[in-house]
Image: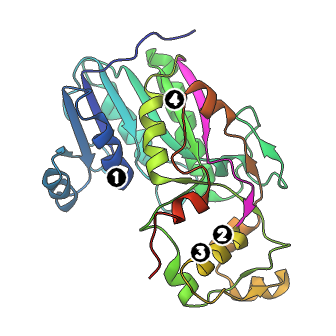
Amino acid sequence: MNSSITSYDSVWIVGCGDIGRRVAALWRGQANEIIGIVSCEPSARLLNRVGISSAQCNLDDLEPVLPELQASTLVYYFIPPPSSGVIDHRCQHFLASLAIQLVKPKRIIAISTTGVYGDCAGDLIGEDQPVKPKADRAKRRFDMESQLKVWCERNNVPLIILRVGGIYGPRRLPLNRIKQGVPVLKEALAPKTNRIHEDDLAQVCVAAAHSQHDFRIYNVSDGTDSNMTEYFFTLADHFGLKRPPALEWEQAEQEISKGMLSYLKESRRIDNSRMLAELDIKLRYPNLEAALEEIKKD
């Protein structure tokens, strides 16, 4: 079933960090009310300083108290999952608190991860690809997706899930890691990786509010075909840094952190054609080089 709902009186951004603030900026003038919901007072003060109304709600609490939901509200769910386990208890608490509201959201848009696809041996992956998350962090994200889907179907609330690759931007680049000479895999061994610039992710989040579907998954990536080692080497060259040492697998397993190794053991190329076509997106940064042109060297 298609939805003709494309306008909103209120916008909630639950988990209003850096991406949330970018989304809020794009919604200014398009909604009567924009509220960033955060877990602590310092985050609330930051929102207020940049002109975003704030509310506090800690989803680690068993019974978190959300603001009163107004009619015709778009809800963004940007809360990171817990740091351990395979169940997203924060999403459980959020949905329990949402359930007691007098009105329901007009639509929910949630950020997930392309990690839910697991290792695809470098294949090109569309949204119909079966999920097979391997890492616990990806399992927590898929648990969040599943909880939202069940709740939204039960309550007749449209849901958009954005499966996002790695997010990058001027303040997100791993330059300290490169300066410290943290090793990488040899380029021939490095897995395929996917990324999206933070500004492009924000415009996708806004465009998703006008999707003509009541349930839809979108892969969010710039669609470039590259690998993680190439990414580090490109950054090192651009900023005039020494390229990090590149290792064989056996040596890498001794010298690279377990967290990074879990990323290196998964390879997939993300097909972003649905996002580009259905959301009518024109990427500002279709590749890393386009972004680096705007970033001055040190």
Residue range of the region highlighted in magenta in the rendering: 213-227
Tell whether 20 sits left or right of 44.
Answer: right
Using the image as rendered, state which of residue 102 and residue 118 is in the foreground. 118
* Amino acid type, callout 2: Tyr
Rendering quarter of residue 275: top right
Choose mark 1 or mark 2, whichever is in front: 2
* Quadrant placement of the C terminus: bottom left
Numbered badge on residue 235? 3
Residue 173 location in percent, x, y?
50, 70
Residue found at x 57% / y 9%: 1
Badge 3 vs badge 2, beta-carbon distance below 8 Å: yes
Question: Which one is earlier in the sequence, the residue at label 4 or at label 3?
Answer: 4
Q: Under tag 1, what secondary structure?
A: loop
Kind of residue indicated by mark 4: Ile
Residue 219 in magenta stretch: yes
Q: Is residue 65 visible?
A: no
